[in-house]
Image: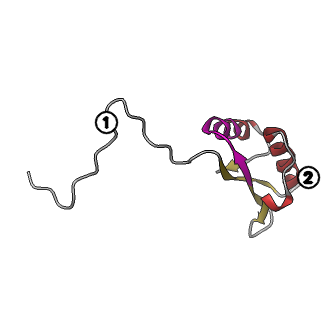
Amino acid sequence: MNQDGPPAPPGPAAGEEKKPLIEYPAVYTFKVMGKQEHGFVEYVRALFKRLMGTEISPDSIREQPSSKGKYVSVSISVYLLSEEHRRSIYAQLHQEKRVIYYL
């Protein structure tokens, strides 16, 4: 059978692990969205302070209100040591009632 285009690159050999997409330690940016009310940005800063065990620098946080101002997106960059740490933060974000959406 004739195929168009180049052949697909080979996958990892049996017993070989795929290379992770993120190499740790790394600075990783989470994006957290919620309603623009009751200090949502400070709430996110305090949440990440608790999750990271350290103060979050104001330089590490950016906020972007929605076009109508009802919602706000908070981008927060933190230093992660492992994939497990990244996943645990996402798991905690999933539990938070004030967090509407996260990336």
Q: Nearer the viewer, residue 48 or 57?
A: 57
Using a 10 Å C-alpha cutoff, classify the residue at mark 2 as few (fewer than 14 neighbours), some (14 to 19) or many (20 or more): few
Q: Is residue 60 left or right of residue 83?
A: right
Q: Residue reaching furthest top? A: 15
Residue 87: in magenta span = yes
In terms of secondary structure, where does tag 1 sit?
Answer: loop
Q: Nearer the viewer, residue 96 or 78?
A: 78
Residue in the image at 22% along x and 54% along y: 7
- Which portion, as a residue range, is magenta? 77-90
**Residue of label 1:** 13
Q: Earlier in the sequence, mark 2 or mark 1?
A: 1
Marker disc for residue 26: none
Q: Amino acid at mark 1?
A: Ala
Q: Position of residue 57 (x, y in %)?
A: 85, 56
Is residue 73 shown above or below 26?
Answer: below
Residue in the image at 71% along x and 39% along y: 89
The image quarter containing residue 46 is top right
Q: Nearer the viewer, residue 19 or 103?
A: 19
**Residue of label 2:** 38
Q: Amino acid at mark 2?
A: His
Q: Residue reaching furthest left? A: 1
In terms of secondary structure, where does tag 2 sit?
Answer: loop
